[in-house]
Amino acid sequence: MGRDVERASLRGWLDESLTGAAVVGLLSGDAGAGKTRLLEDLIDHAATRGVVPAVGRASEQEGAPPFWPWRVVLRGLGAPDLLAGADALDRAAERFVRFEAVTSWLAGAADAGGGLLVGIDDLHCADRSSMRLFSHVASGLRGHRVLLVATHRSSPGDHAEGFGSMLADVARLPSRRAMDLGGLGRHAVAELLGSDPSSPVVDRVWALTRGNALFVSELARHIAAGRDVADLPDTLRDVIGVRLSARTAGCLDVLRTAAVVGREFAAGVVATAQGRPAMHVLEDVDEAVAAGLVAPSGVPGRFQFVHALVRDAVEAGVARPALVRLHRQVADAIETYEGAGDDQLSDLARHWDESSVLGDVGVAAAWSERAAGAAERQLAWEEAARLYDRAAALAGPVTDPVDRHRRLVGAARARLHSDEIGSAVARCIDAGRAAREAGRGDLLAEAVLVMEGRGGSGGPEVPALIALAEEALTAIEADDHARRARILGLLAVLHFYAGSGRGPELTDAAEEEAGRTDDPLAAAAAVRARQMTRFGPEHAEERLLLADRIGEAGRAAGDPSITQWEALWRVDALLELGRIPEALATMPLLRQQVGAVGHPISRWHLARSEAVLAAAAGRWEDANRFGRRAQELYAMQEGHEGAVALELALQVSIGIHTGFAPTVLADYDRLDVGRAPAYVNDIPILLPLLPLVALGRHDEARSLYARTMPVTRWEPPPFLWLPIHVFRLLAAIAVGRLDDVEPLVDRLRSSRGFHVAGGGGPIAYFGCVELHLGEAAIALGRWEDAATELRFAVAEGQRTGTPPFEVRAAALLAEALVARRQGGDAAEAAGLARRYLPAAGSFGMQPWVARLGRLTAGAPPRPTGPLSERELEVAGLVARGLSNKAIAAELHISTRTAQNHVQHILTKLGVSNRTQVASWFTGDRR
């Protein structure tokens, strides 16, 4: 009643999804607002439209098996158990594969029929692994006839851990729709009460309930039972309490035991816990059903409370000592009646935990650890981490240190898989204390090596992890070469991120230890450390050899998560060497190796490599498609902010050639660049500068550039040295900081012959270094240098098969020749313009089409540099000798505005007077 508008909106979501545009709907509201009933109504409507519905409800209490609501959904659709536990070499990758399998299965089910409605009820209290799966499915169903809808409570106080971040992830999806369910209107309240809207009873009920559907319904029952209207209970719990007081003693006992079991319960478990015959318990359950307190669940012998608040009210009426004893009885009953398989372990752990005050702390800790192991087998990392933590907390600091170490290592491993690096390190540190207490160097090493392969984040946890690794190195036996190599390799990586300069020395030590053992993991650790010390294109040839070595180690270990680096390192090194055709020829191997892993970060590397190579060849549509996929993959694993920044790097490499869309900075503008990790230096500041200038946001660009350190004192991290120097050079030219261009050129000259790519995995490709030196020479008016550098860049574009870079270099060369004005320059420039104008057009390089078009028309080239179109116009009038007043009259602007334009021009060009502006404009800049 009273939900016509809301029902229409939900049906609109369904209609929209049936057009092939998947919709993710979030229906929020207070407890008892009627969210579940609206979802049920939508399900009924969907069935009339030929849409297949499937709904799973999250448990309001801890204890449900991991992924429970999703497993109910899949079972309802007749799907195989896509979330079943299984052994896997790379378990993090395996989870991604399973998430993808669930998404693909749902998409296939939708496409095979008339559409699909998937509902997750009470998502706010689901286990975090189910929330992660919801985010994954929500982002992966684009283009399919699916409505994915979840209900959740509005109050953050009701949200389980992780729900807020999941909401933020989903909120970024264009397919997301949301509705917050308020209270019922007065007329609907009156209808439920069977009263006139103007009745004092309606006024009283409205004042008490504010239209909460469940509360209104309970009061309607209360009044219908003939109770005094003047003495209505003023809380929902009180009115339920009144109803409970009318039940028989046997019914109340059953309800109390059932409330401890959970929202849904098996009558057999309740009977076993009470030690009563099942038939007697079923008679009491029937009484509760007749009273509207519980209802059949649809599975024989299983029932559910009609609402979580009803269960809560029943449990609240049980005294604490009795409640603790009931939890113990229910634990025994579950094990007796249902067994102690993986599906029961989380529930058993909860009940033993609740009853641990009776003195069974060790037993409770053991059940929590068993449940954590089951969650880990099912790849529910977040739930495993919670349960391992709980096991350690229950046992306390006085337990056996080996047991404590095992539980803490389990918690660290699970949190690392769910990308909680700081929390994982903290538990490694605690595990190290337990190993120290046990006097076990091998356990200390195990605590450290949890972080192997993920030791580098540049975060505050790095120093603590370094200290733990160094302690482990001294604690293990001198002849334990395999562990020593792995710890030394991890230390080298950690010191790399810490910027201590000890990386090479530790890498040498790791390789020496690895050479004394045939353990492939030791070899992989040493090679990985060596690769991180050989950043920069000057070491690209050596990195090709390291790629071969990591491949050999991965194959020896039978671990594709190691082998995948072989092709990735090759592509990256080949890009820096300008061997683009060879990089393209390596892509099939990279696809094969990443396909064997399946981890989202592995797929990100692949998608990013595909995007970079497509952009280098001018296949902009492919580059953007792969770039979007890369952004999605990175966001789901590492976070939205980093994903946006990395995507902007690709868009800058494209936009330099095709121009920048007004929306290119839409996501980036919302980021706080101050939160970027220190090891990326000024890249977050420099990345948006070219789009800002191109879009006319000059003041923002200048303000942002001013946040960089002066070039003379600027030392970016070595592994980003070449890309970040090129970014800054282009930015300095764009904002008119010509005083910075000279020292940047001096630094970049040592990198001639190399190409600008990633150095640690392709991020974007910016062509050969000579291209940028040539553009800088033009900005400085050094025409001879410009011609030399740009002729080489044109030849490199031809040799490498990167036509956009060839076109760009040719256009810049033509402009430099026109400005140089030596014999034959004009004819050569015109020839270049005629030759490359069709190519610029065919590749959609509109800014370069315009520049080449001016050259073919015989017009003087537009002066390159940092000025906007309006500022170029003003500079031309300054070159003609016009005063500010005359410029204002010419352009129909105020004298003050003309004065401001001239001042901006002086600032951008880094000059001090109008004569210098005139010289710049006419091309006499030598």
Image (spheres, rainbow, N blue to C red):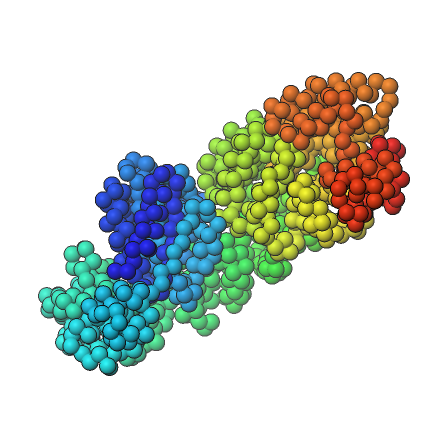
Report whether 261 appears left or right of 885.
Answer: left
Q: Is residue 452 above or below residue 837?
A: below
Note whether residue 584 is visible.
yes
Q: Quadrant of residue 511?
A: top right
Note whether residue 791 is visible.
no
Give residue 129's position: percent from left, percent from top.
40, 54
Identify the residue at horizontal 14%, vertical 67% (top origin).
290
Q: Is residue 640 above or below residue 543?
A: below
- Comparing 216 with 61, the one in front is 216
Give residue 493's position: percent from left, percent from top.
62, 49
Give residue 236's position: percent from left, percent from top.
29, 73
Give residue 135's position: percent from left, percent from top.
42, 50
Counting labels gives 0
Q: Quadrant of residue 429?
A: bottom right
Identify the residue at horizontal 28%, vertical 48% (top origin).
54
Identify the residue at horizontal 67%, vertical 31% (top origin).
847
- Comparing 459 with 898, the one in front is 898
- Comparing 123 with 517, the one in front is 123
- Comparing 733 with 330, the one in front is 733
Query: Which image quarter is the N terminus in?
Result: bottom left
Report whether 744 appears left or right of 197.
Answer: right
Report whether 327 appears left or right of 482.
Answer: left
Q: Quadrant of residue 286?
A: bottom left
Query: Which image quarter is the C terminus in?
Result: top right
Q: Is residue 483 above or below residue 271?
A: above
Q: Is residue 687 above or below residue 411?
A: above
Report whether 698 appears left or right of 139.
Answer: right
Identify the residue at horizontal 13%, vertical 69% (top origin).
287
